[in-house]
């Protein structure tokens, strides 16, 4: 597939010049630079964009997230002040829906949104006028408990890939193939020490992924929880046990495309390694209170009951609401692939939906 416009071609050419000048670049650098350009100047969400996230499917998603946070806040003693923090808030839809639910239960937190994209900040400001904005979590005040949410945020952070070659483990890089096209190539420097011992003897061709960027975010959030109190939800597609193979994908106009076709014009993502991130969080002093499938979590929080209540008030929406329940929680839709991971401060209670 060719690039889809002048800007995409322009960025792709920049990538090619960079590699021609300096040699192959890491997958992390390729992904990071492409996504920085992709998110900077567009709203990628919705039917007219490239993908749809759970908050855009139904108001029920944000409402249940808000209810989960309210329940925890109440059981933790109704601390005041408290900060609601969202990483990568999209259009602000989740925050708006969650805050509406919080207000019904007497919770009015200070709102802090972590967003680097000027285009998305503009939309978020309209949805959540009271929000304060930061480029990264370090700008969030350090003196109050956090109620933090990150939905489809970790998957867009750059990943590092290692590949087993006949000569041992090497970093997987982006370079040129024999025809001069962008392609994956193996680096020359031995990387065996960076591979988990359990995977060290995998056969040639095996790919292992890590995300130092995701680990850094979890470290910061976990440190904050340990020091400030609060709880966090990370919702994304990924896996809860060891796995190998490349999960890097590009999505454009709701279809998967070649990641090299138009860097900067498609959304590059990878699956989240929740097991590793849970370990990272615990090493920083936070409690990991569970990782479960999104469908099971939403049903435990009352997704079907909320849909029934909305349908009773608006019978014409019954089919739409049933379709939203299936999309959010169905095993063949988002229900199994998407996971929900909860973290908490040492002295905060467990959140709902993670038992057994």
Image (cartoon, rainbow, N blue to C red):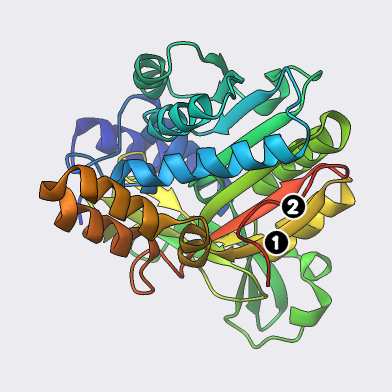
Q: Is residue 331 above or below residue 154?
A: below
**Is 296 in front, or is 284?**
296
Residue 169 sits in quarter? bottom right
Q: Residue at x 82, y 42 (%)?
A: 345
Q: Position of residue 239 (x, y in %)?
A: 58, 68
- Give the alpha-carbon distance from disc 2 to disc 1, as whole Å: 9 Å
- In the shown orientation, is residue 248 left or right of residue 138? left
Label pair 2/1, CB-CB below 8 angstroms: yes
Residue 134 placement (x, y as % from top left): 59, 18
Quarter that holds the N terminus: bottom left
**Mark in the foreground, 2 or 1:** 2
Residue appearing at x 49%, y 11% in the figure: 130
Residue in the picture at 76% in, 65% down: 191
- The residue to which callout 1 is attached is 290
**Camera-side residue of 347 and 85:** 347
Q: Residue furthest left?
A: 316
Is disc 1 placed on a helix, strand or loop?
A: strand
Direction from residue 58 to residue 189 in the image, left or right:
right
> Of label 2 and label 1, which has the lower sequence position?
1
Residue 81 visible to an observer of this rendering: yes
Query: Picture quarter containing residue 94?
Result: top left
**Residue under the point 60% across and 48% down:** 234
Q: Residues within 10 Å of mark 2 (few under 14, many from 20)?
A: many
Could you say which disc has been placed on residue 350 in the image? Answer: 2
Asked if residue 145 is positioned above or below residue 184 in the image, the reply reads above
Query: Element under label 2?
Result: loop
The residue lying toward the viewer, choosing from 204 and 106, is 106
Can residue 186 be seen at all in this image of the molecule? no
Q: What is the x, y in percent for residue 272?
A: 58, 59
Q: Residues within 10 Å of mark 1 (few under 14, many from 20)?
A: some
Q: From the image, which quarter does the C terminus lie in?
A: bottom right
Q: Nearer the viewer, residue 58 or 51?
A: 58
């Amino acid at each position: 597939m060719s690039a889809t416009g002048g800007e995409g071609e322009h960025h792709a050419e920049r990538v090619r010049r960079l590699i021609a000048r300096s040699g192959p670049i890491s997958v992390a650098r390729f992904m990071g630079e492409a996504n920085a350009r992709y998110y900077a100047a567009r709203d990628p969400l919705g039917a007219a964009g490239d993908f749809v996230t759970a908050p855009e499917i139904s108001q029920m998603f944000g409402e249940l997230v808000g209810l989960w946070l309210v329940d925890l806040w109440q059981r933790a003693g109704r601390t005041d002040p408290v900060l609601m923090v969202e990483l990568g808030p999209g259009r602000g839809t989740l925050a708006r829906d969650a805050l509406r639910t919080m207000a019904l239960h007497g919770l009015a937190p200070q709102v802090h949104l972590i967003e680097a994209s000027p285009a998305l900040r503009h939309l978020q400001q309209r949805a959540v006028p009271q929000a304060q904005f930061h480029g990264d979590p370090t700008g969030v005040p350090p003196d109050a408990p956090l109620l933090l949410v990150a939905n489809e945020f970790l998957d867009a952070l750059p990943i590092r890939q290692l590949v087993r070659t006949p000569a041992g483990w090497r970093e997987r890089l982006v370079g040129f193939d024999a025809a001069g096209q962008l392609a994956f190539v193996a680096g020359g420097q031995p990387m065996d020490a960076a591979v988990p011992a359990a995977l060290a003897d995998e056969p040639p061709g095996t790919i292992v992924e890590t995300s130092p960027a995701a680990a850094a975010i979890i470290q910061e959030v976990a440190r904050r929880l340990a020091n400030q109190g609060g709880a966090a939800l990370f919702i994304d597609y990924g896996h809860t046990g060891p796995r190998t193979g490349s999960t890097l994908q590009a999505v454009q106009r709701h279809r998967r495309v070649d990641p090299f076709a138009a860097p900067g014009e498609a959304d590059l993502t990878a699956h989240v390694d929740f097991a590793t991130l849970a370990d990272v969080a615990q090493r920083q002093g936070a409690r990991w209170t569970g990782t479960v499938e999104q469908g099971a979590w939403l049903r435990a929080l009352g997704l079907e009951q909320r849909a029934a209540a909305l349908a009773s008030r608006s019978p014409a929406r019954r089919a739409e609401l049933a379709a939203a329940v299936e999309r959010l929680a169905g095993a063949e839709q988002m229900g199994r692939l998407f996971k929900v991971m909860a973290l908490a401060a040492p002295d905060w209670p467990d959140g709902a939906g993670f038992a057994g």
